[in-house]
Image (tube, helix red, strand yellow):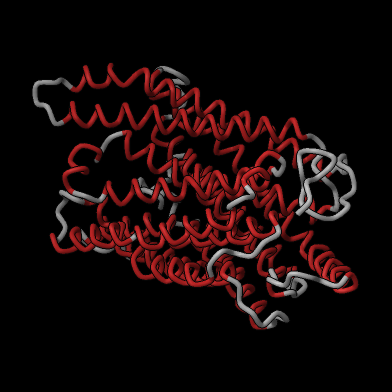
Amino acid sequence: MSTATAILPHDRERAAAERAGIDESCRGPVLYFAASAIFWLLAGSILAIIASVKLHSPYFLTGIPELTFGRVRMAHLQGVSIGWTSMVTMGGSVWMMCRLCRTELIYPKLLYVSATLWNIGTLLSISGILLGDGQSIEWLDAPRYCPPFFIAGLGIVSAWVAATFRRRREKHVYVTQWYILAAVFWFPWLYTVAVFMISWSPATGVVQPIVNWWFNHNFLGLWLTPVAVGTAYYLIPKIIGRPVHSYYLSITGFWALALFYSWAGMHHLIGGPIPAWLATASTVGSMMMFIPVIAVGINHHMTMRNHFHRLKYSPALRFTVFGSITYTWVSFQGSIESLKDFSEVAHFTHYTVAHAHLGAYGFVTMIFFGLYYYMIPRLTGREWASSTLIRIHFWCASIGITIYFVGLSIGGWWQGRMLNNPDVSFASITQYLLPYLFSRTVAGILLTIGHIAFATSFLMNLAGWGKKRAGGPTYFVEKAPTV
């Protein structure tokens, strides 16, 4: 991402050849991660629709113990959090790290082993939950025999990232690399500690929920968020052809995230039997998160300034900017939710569910879609075969998550108000929520249609149906705008 205003033709050709060589070396392992992730996305989407329908039509698929709401909902969470987002995080990190280090892929067989271990763990996790072996612990629902597969697979990727960074040919360390290195250091520690203290050698009393929400919140904040934000920092400048607006804002956003986010999880336990100082410290940490979010938001916006017209042409940019804008909104919302007065209404309601999905889908997943729309053609050497499928995917995803968030936010807020009113019966609250729960199912169907379009595009690309790449970003139109 040089800031040079002029690049000699032979230097440009040499750089293009170097990138092509790196992409060629990454092709097999990274596409394996991508194909696996998309498979789990589809599986998780189907499970999500089943769970959603059961909320407003409880007799749907009755008599099948494997498809009761509790099991299906846990299996869905494992499919999309462990199967989809985590595999994109690992595979995408591998490719971006190679690109930014200007180093061809090393130890590819180890990455195949890592992805296979992760797939086995995810399969055992989902099937075990559906068969009744789940632990009923939020975000750690997987049976006790699954974590070794995840720890081993994650350890391989983390060691690989460190080894690649050590062999880098590009001495300048770009902001995306900061976030990737931090994520692969933080998450193995988070996951291993949480599994030991909750599953393998359970802590007693109130320590368990504290560890549980320390892990849950940091799964998004110190695993998915760093890589998603780093991905946006990589894609936006690459697509529009200009450097990041401010190096100093990048530093501020990174270190503020590292300093404040790990404190934020305890606000989920406000009002619970935990030390008051812990909840207060969590609220302070949540409010301090305004600093990194504002820094990242300003940096991304100012980088895009005078280039927003490219959203009309670039599918990768369209998804990435949607996710980047959502990051600002969902983070502000999360900070406000940590306040005790707000939590008195929103806690234990569908409002929290809406917020969680806006973060995991509207922010993280949308940026990851942008990464795939940029990365896959470079790995296969083929453009996307159908711009129509890409448009279907974008509009189904963006409209679907909007319906989901708005519907459950409104319904959840009034649900909280009514739960705090002793004169309102629980049955009447349930009846009131039915239209909002139905909107959740409609949103889920739209999202799934988008995912099917995305998977179809991916398979067509693998089959070689698209045109051979001529270089440069992928656009919706034949004649790309000049950079």
Relative to 177, say whether 472 is above or below. above
Image check: 200 left or right of 285?
A: right
Image check: 216 left or right of 308?
A: left
Residue 314: x and y in percent read: 70, 44
For the point 68% across and 50% down, the residue is 372
Residue 391 in view of the camera: yes
Q: Name the foreground residue: 235 vs 385.
A: 235
Q: Name the foreground residue: 470 vs 357.
A: 470
Q: Name the foreground residue: 253 vs 248.
A: 248
Please identify the quarter of the rendering in which residue 108 is found: bottom right
Residue 70: x and y in percent read: 39, 35
Relative to 43, say whether 252 is above or below. below
Relative to 123, say whether 437 is above or below. above
Image check: 157 left or right of 257?
A: right
Residue 458: x and y in percent read: 75, 42
For the point 31% across and 55% down, the residue is 213
Image check: 2 left or right of 292?
A: right
For the point 21% across and 63% down, the residue is 281
Please identify the quarter of the rendering in which residue 341 is found: top left
For the point 64% across and 83% down, the residue is 166
Residue 224: x and y in percent read: 50, 57
Q: Name the foreground residue: 220 vs 151.
A: 220
